Amino acid sequence: MRTHTCGQLRAEDVDTEVVLAGWVANRRDHGVVHFVDLRDRYGMIQLVADEDAPEGGMEGLSGLHPEDVIQVKGVVRMRVEGQRNPDRDTGDVEVLVSSASKISSAARLPFEIADHIDVPEEMLMRYRYLDMRRSPMQERMKLRTIANHAFRKALIEEGFYEIETPMLTRSTPEGARDYLVPSRMRQGSWYALPQSPQLFKQLSMVGGMDKYFQIARCMRDEDLRADRQPEFTQLDMEMSFVDEEDVYSLVESVMAAVYREIKGVELQLPLERMPYAESVRRFASDKPDLRNPIEVVDLASEGAVLDFVVFNNVLKDGGWVRGIRVPAGSSLSRKQVDSIEAAAKDAGAGGAAWCKVTADGPTGPLSRFLKAKEDEHPVVCPVGIAGLSEAGAAFLKALNASPGDLVVTIADAPRRAMTALDAIRNKAGALMDLIQGPDCLLWITEFPLFEETDDGGYHPAHHPFTCPVMDDVEALKSGEKESIRSRAYDLVLNGVELGSGSVRIHDRDLQKSIFKAIGLSEEVANERFAFLLEAFRYGVPPHAGFAIGLDRLYALLFGADTIRDVIAFPKTATASCPLTGAPSVVDETQMGELGISQLVPENLNEA
RNA sequence: GGGGAUGUGGCGCAAUUGGUUAGCGUACCAGACUGUCGAUCUGGUGGUUGCGAGUUCGAGUCUCGUCAUCCUCGCCA
């Protein structure tokens, strides 16, 4: 159908007879000269019909509409000096058209196919096939292919097998909410779509596959975010006879391969590592962006809590009183400081108390707790801040604040305080333009094995197949769950959790005791994980693995704002697909075959 | 499940803060035009303001509800 693509022709092709096909990107009709820009995935070429063109040319290029699909025959010719287009690879030449035929005509478009347009994202998703014709999506799909290939190549060269695991599998309700699929053959029973190939990759290790990887789709029926989709893609890996060091170096080498391929940079290896406890203490986060130099100070443990009723009450209830120093932050406007407080509130905290530090003394809402009272002598402050009380001086000393800085504090229950501190740290870092420099990849290690649930129970922080740190196993026996560290690790890129993994349990008894610790009775554990526990009877290699969230990685690597931008056909925040209209109501007969009936009236769903 | 933002021709925005026939840009359509490349010029089609109710002489504008999209807390082993 074509001899060349639209991005292919150059000066050396002059006088070649060509057949081209593509979409009409633009027309410029000058009466006796017609131009058409013909576009395909490979580029854009200018077609022309003028007085030199055979008769069919002018006729063929008339009456075309944007995005019509056409096929043209013609001859490549050099453009006259001064009429070349240096912005286009094909800009030195054009095709003098001898005939053109319309293969498929396009209706009026919902939006222009151009790079400069500003269209609601919902519109782009509803007409994704049109959005895909534009260069941002073209570029991202290309980069995604290159990056996927780089990962595959690196892993296969390391001796990994690519193993496809089932999409119809068993429900594991202790994790995220499952997407369920009814079984027709065995009515009343259900498959679940995989939240991850976790158990199958472990079974592959029992099966002696030694090194497994898969670019795997995972489904989780939970609420969405800018960086969360109901189905997403992971680079999933597992290795036998290894420990965490082997996993770190493998993941580092495949990440380096992708950075080389996509960004043309060499990653500095090995990557920095930080234990979870240190990360939480210094950055109030298990995924800190270390490009941001701001650190969190625990004012209570520094003995620097002000006599402020809000702080006192929070501490009494076991909460956190912690703060950050924003270097040179007193240059921020009131509006900008308010936006930091708004970030704290948005993260669920009651608010954020702040003051600006000047040589004449602190200013702002918190300042009255820092200043010496009228009957007190102000403290002589070593960094030269006037009018401070002793408590005020200690407070600023703990934060290492000096004139010109801004200090922001959060007082709240630990979990909320952590979210809020992370939010204000990020916000302040962004406002002060502190977040600079090359991409920051970092390992967070020694995650806690368990997390306390709202009802006072415990559930696995990672998943129940994670091996505890051996030194902490004694604590497991004595029931001190919260202090047990795990051999789980996360990879963090610029403050985004890119992936996680762990050394797995390969001992049947240890696995059983973990099930017990998370409140799974032996019967339930046996019922749900019988296949795993049984497999563990037949010789299990020690194994460990990792999974990288590719959508998140690619969003960062390709400079996209959300993971939707790097997914060909993404879903909305309510997990619906604007293109196909999924999820949709199904026929009664379809449900009948599956032995299910609808409880919710249909009109509720359709409203 | 909670909080917040947004919703006006296909798209981007405006409408003197409750007052005539909802305006502009762009796209689209038609015509003109010897070289354009986000062409240009002229003309034209197209909306009752997401949906529903209410207040009012009068609602794009105020109130309540609802829906959709986005952000976010919870949630995401």
Image: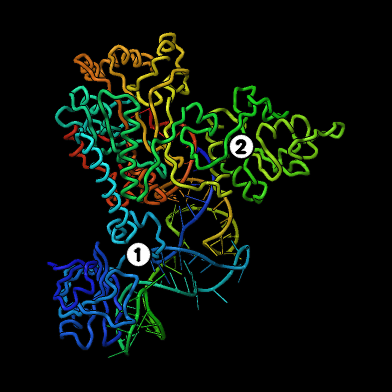
Residue A313 in the image, given as x and y percentages of width and height: 66, 26
Q: Amino acid at mark 2?
A: Ile
- Looking at the picture, tell me which residue is in the foreground, A275 or A26: A275
Chain for disc number 2: A
Residue under pointer 1: A111
In this rendering, would A604 be left or right of A281? Answer: left
Q: Amino acid at mark 1?
A: Phe
Residue A402 in the image, given as x and y percentages of width and height: 69, 40
Residue A324's disc number: 2
Q: Quadrant of the N terminus of chain A?
A: bottom left
Give the residue drawn at x 62%, y 34%: A323
Residue A150 in view of the camera: yes
In this rendering, would A192 be left or right of A114? Answer: left
**Residue at the left extreme of this rendering:** A1
Residue A170 in view of the camera: no
Q: CA distance from mark 1 to mark 2?
A: 46 Å
Q: Residues within 10 Å of mark 2 (few under 14, many from 20)?
A: many
Residue A308 in the image, given as x and y percentages of width and height: 71, 30
Give the residue drawn at x 42%, y 28%: A445
Residue A470 in the image, given as x and y percentages of width and height: 39, 15
